[in-house]
Image: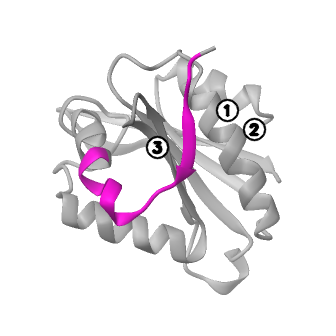
Amino acid sequence: MPSWTIRDATPDDAAACAEIYEPYVRDTVISFETEPPTAEEMADRIKSAQAEHAWLVLEADDKVVGYAYATQHRTRAAYRWACDVSIYLETGRRRSGAGKALYAALLPLLRERGYRRALAGIALPNEASIGLHRSFGFTDVGVYRRIGWKLDAWHDVAWMQLDL
């Protein structure tokens, strides 16, 4: 079993998180952002997530190698008990158990904080992510067809939900 530490993120982790996230933005449709956020923008995201939801980092050998977070699902008040969740791992760490370790820490924390539903939007195809979410009990909600334009093509997004 790998030696990992999972802890609450701080704005000091922003540069590492931005570095992990950049290849997802530049080279994949896993993220629908088209410009990687700066470390300063990532620090603001961490502060915002920590204020209402959660942001965790996974460290190996004293280096941040992955993170998971939750954010507001929608702005209307009736949605306040639901949150969106995401995981990003350093290149080469997918299918290593790191994502499972992060969700195993994040999901109970969200439950303790009073959230009732966790939702995940997954750009398709992404069988690894679908499998990870199903392993935690997420169920299919639906698919937004051809909702995002990136890398010169339209992409679908599957939505999955977990009752916390």
Q: Position of residue 85 (x, y in %)?
A: 58, 51
Q: Position of residue 63 (x, y in %)?
A: 35, 36
Nearer to me, 38 or 28: 38
Q: What residue type is labelled 2?
A: Phe
* Quarter of the rendering occupied by the N terminus: top right
Q: How crowded is mark 1: few (under 14 residues within 10 Å), some or many (20 or more)?
A: many
Residue at horizontal 64%, vertical 29%?
Answer: 100
Q: Which amino acid does label 3 sit on?
A: Tyr
Query: Given contact means CB atoms under 8 Å apart, are the residues at marks 2 and 1 in contact?
Result: yes
The vertical placement of 117 against 146, above or below, is: below
The vertical placement of 123 against 32, above or below, is: above
Q: Which span of residues is magenta-colored?
A: 2-16
Query: Given contact means CB atoms under 8 Å apart, are the residues at marks 2 and 3 in contact?
Result: no
Q: Position of residue 143 (x, y in %)?
A: 58, 40
Give the residue at mark 3.
67
Q: What residue type is labelled 1?
A: His
Give the residue at mark 1.
133
Question: How far is disc 2 from disc 3 in space, using C-alphas?
Answer: 19 Å
Residue at horizontal 72%, vertical 60%?
Answer: 110
- SS at mark 2? loop
Give the residue at mark 2.
138
